[in-house]
Image (cartoon, grey):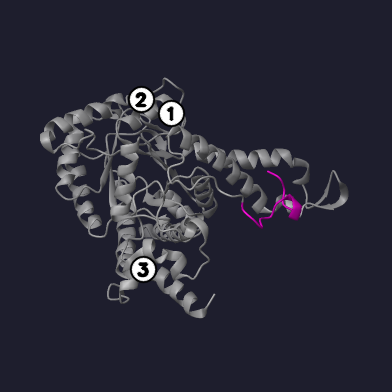
Amino acid sequence: MKIAVVAFFVIAQCGAFAPAHYSRTVTSSTLLGAKEKGGTSKELDLPCADECAISKYPNLPESIHPGVLSGQAQMDLLNHAKEHGYAIPAVNCVSNSGINACLEAARKNDAPIIIQFSSGGSQFYGGKGLDNSNYRAAIAGAVSGAFHVRTMAEQYGVPVILHTDHCAKKLLPWIDGLLSASERYYEQHGEPLFSSHMIDLSEEPIEENIEICKEYLTRMDKIGILLEMELGITGGEEDGVDNSDRPIEDLYSKPEEIYQVYEELMKISDKFTVAAAFGNVHGVYSPGNVKLEPKILSRAQDYISEKLGDKAPADKKPVAFVFHGGSGSDVADIQEAIGYGVIKMNIDTDTQWSYWEGIKNFETKYHDYLQTQIGNPDGPDKPNKKYYDPRESMRAAEVNTVARLGKSYADLKCQNILGLGEVEPADNVLGPRRGGLPV
């Protein structure tokens, strides 16, 4: 890579944390952005062929392109999902291996994907050896993950919404840091670093929840970032937040509350989604333990449409809903919720298990080769390096996760959306013929 390109890469990444007075001159070529100029691949002089090089997809609006979406392109994708009756899987990631599995699954299913980071996942991405005072590690980790997604999404040829998950009131400084990074990135590139952020103030009084969300939406809308807000409580436990003992009535949102949110946020921008509660639970739970009530979403759409009167959209689905606690849910409930305007479903627990299961199965398959560095069933002097090479077990985890995400894509009716057809097998990869292990 040319020295000038390397220098630009350093400037582009460090720019997210540059002092307030720093500003690179914004040229017309910079503002053209990913759709016309090839985005990160163009800027870093990376090879970009086949799907990576296309400017639009056969089956989607022209604004939607390979790479990270924001602004109107993101809205066009979400509106397309609502109009055509599918939801996009949103996967929490804690490593670049997990991100790559998501991108591979998206291309394999010919579909978009939402990649998201929680505060804890962001901190892990930055490294548990880095001090997290003032959310330093969580901010740096999320920014690092964002650049990985931006670099690789175009190479896989898929559209990605880059999101951050639950941000409770105490975590707002984390989002403040990421918004500052996006504002700096916007000055340089004409688009934000992230696509969207979730502000989760569901444990606060609804009036406070709405007022704080309005403040953040005002800031986000200026640079094309979407706000996801939570209304009502998602049960269970995730990322250190335990709602397993909350009263059952807290798990169900009221149509009047959803309308109150819609009415207030629409005064600022239409770039928002609502994670309403209809019995959702984070984590693993036995069927029947908590009853999902997707019709809550339908009643809310009807109620708001009636309030809007002639201003209601033709499909009578004014709200774009988000399905939290989606892992382990019954397919019938998932697809019913999609019919009521759900355009995004979070998946964390199931992909955590699929990643671990891939490693577990790998260890079982090659157990006798993974006990010592030298010596295995093939002979006492035989080396085992290729078996304990971390790439092998991690790849097994990725393959298993790609397969699990295939089920999610099918459940969400989110397959063959882009119109690219089947993906060709990758060339020149380390397979069995070159010493790689079959997984």
- What residue is shown at x 74% (from left), y 42% (from top)? 366
Most extreme residue toward the bottom is: 3
Question: Which comes sooner in the sequence, label 1 or label 3?
Answer: 3
Q: In which quarter of the image is residue 16?
A: bottom left
Observer-nearest of 248 and 361: 361
The residue that disc 3 covers is: 17
Query: Mark 3: which amino acid?
Result: Phe
Query: Mark 1: which amino acid?
Result: Ser
Observer-nearest of 33 and 49: 49
What is the span of residues highlighted in magenta in the rendered image?
426-439
The residue that disc 2 covers is: 292
Query: Badge 1, how many Cα within 10 Å: few under 14, some, many 20+?
Result: some
Give the distance between the C-alpha atoms of the residues marked 2 and 1, in whole angstroms. 9 Å
SS category of the residue bearing label 3: helix
SS category of the residue bearing label 1: loop
Question: Which comes sooner in the sequence, label 2 or label 3?
Answer: 3
Residue 296 at x, y percent in the picture = 27, 26
Q: Using the image, tell me which numbered label, if any, was put on residue 47.
A: none
The residue that disc 1 covers is: 329
- What residue is shown at x 50% (from left), y 48% (from top)? 107
Residue 285 among magenta residues: no
SS category of the residue bearing label 2: loop
Does residue 40 lie above or below 281 as drawn? Answer: below
Tell me if 376 is positioned left or right of 361 in this view. Answer: right
Query: Badge 2, how many Cα within 10 Å: few under 14, some, many 20+?
Result: many
